[in-house]
Image (cartoon, rainbow, N blue to C red):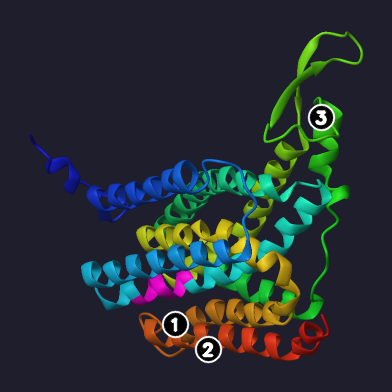
Amino acid sequence: MDISFLMIDWLGKPLWMWLSFLTIVVILLVFDLGVLHRDNHEIGVRESLLLSAMYISLGLAFGGWVWWQLGSEPGLNYFTGFVVEKTLALDNVFVIALIFSFFAVPRIYQHRVLFWGIIGVIVLRAIMIGLGATLVSEFSWVLYIFAAFLIVTGIKMLLIGDKEPEIGNNPLIRFLRRRFNVTDEHHGQDFFVKKPDPRTGKAVWFMTPLFMALVMVEIADVIFAVDSVPAIFAITTDPFIVYTSNIFAILGLRALFFALAAMIHRFRYLKPALAIVLVFIGSKIFVADLMGLEKFPAGVSLTVTIGIIAAGIGYSLWRTRKSELAA
C-alpha cells in the first residue's frame, strides 16, 4: 500500500503529523464522552483535578514530542503558547460560570455543554488560525498589527480592570428569543424539544436554555480567540505549533472548569498578570527588530511568560488567603 501521501506538505508540516495530532484529539474526546462520562453525573473537585492533571500531562508530553521531532525552538514556542492559552482559558472560566448561572444550567448537564462547546472550539480555532496563517504568510506586516493589538489590549486590561459582562443584555440572546422558539424551562440534557406552538397548537421544535448556554459559550470563545490567536502568532507563525498548543490547552478547560468555578475569586490578581504577558508578547516583536535580532529568544520568552503568570497566581493566592480562611 502506497503511503507516500502522508509525506505531503500541508501548512509547513508533513500530513502524517497533522493526522497524528487529530487522531489523538479524537481518541481523547471519544474516551471523555464515551467512557468517562457515558452517564450524566456531577463532576466533583477531585475528579476535575485528576482529569485536569491528565490533560495537562498529555499537553506537556506532546510538547516534549514536538521538541524531539522539530527541535528546541519549536518546542519552546509550543510550551510558551500552551502556557499563555491555558492562562487565557482561566479567564474564560469566569465568563462560562456566569453563563451557566444566568441560564440556571444544572451541574449534572454542564459537562455536556462544555463537551459540545469544545467541538465547536476545535473547528472555529482551525478557521481563525488558518486565516491568520494565510494573512501572515502573504503579508508579513500583519504580524506587527497583531503585536500592536496585543499591547493595546494588555494596557486596556490594566487600566479598565474587571467588568462583569451583562449576559441578559446580550443582543444575540434577544435575537434568538425574538426569531426562534425558545423554552424557559430545562428539558433534561436535550438541546431541542418538541412542544405545541402557543399560536397554532402544532408540535414544533423549541430551543432549550441548555442550547442557549452552548451558543453563548461558543460566542465567548470567539471573543477570547480575538486575544489568544494574535498572542500565539506573536510567539510563532508556525501553523502546526499555533494550532496544537491552542487545542491542547483548551482540551483540559472542561475538566478544569469544575475545580476552578468555585474558587475563581482566589485568582483575582491573575488578570493584571495576563495583561502584562500580552504587552510583553506584543512588545518582543518590536524589541527584536530594534535589537537587530531575527527572532526574540524563545527560551527568554518562555521564562518571562511563566515568571509573570506564576507571580500573578502566587500574589492572588496570598492576597485572598484571609477570605479563604474566613470561609
SS label for mark 3: loop
Q: Which residue is disc 3 drawn over?
A: 182
Q: Which residues are magenta?
A: 76-82
Q: Amino acid at mark 1?
A: Leu
Residue 39 falls inside the magenta stretch: no
Q: Residue furthest left?
A: 1
Which one is nearer the viewer's eye here, 63 or 36?
36
SS label for mark 2: helix
Which one is nearer the viewer's eye here, 155 or 163?
163
Q: Quadrant of residue 256?
A: bottom right
Q: Earlier in the sequence, mark 2 or mark 3?
A: 3
Main secondary structure along the magenta-highlighted residues = helix
User: How many other residues sit within 10 Å of disc 1, few (<14), some (14-19) or many (≥20)?
Assistant: some
Q: Earlier in the sequence, mark 3 or mark 1?
A: 3
Closer to the camera: disc 2 or disc 3?
Answer: 3
Q: Which mark is residue 302?
A: 1
Q: Earlier in the sequence, mark 1 or mark 2?
A: 1
Q: Which mark is residue 307?
A: 2
Residue 77 falls inside the magenta stretch: yes
Q: How many marks?
A: 3
Q: Position of residue 244 (x, y in %)?
A: 40, 59
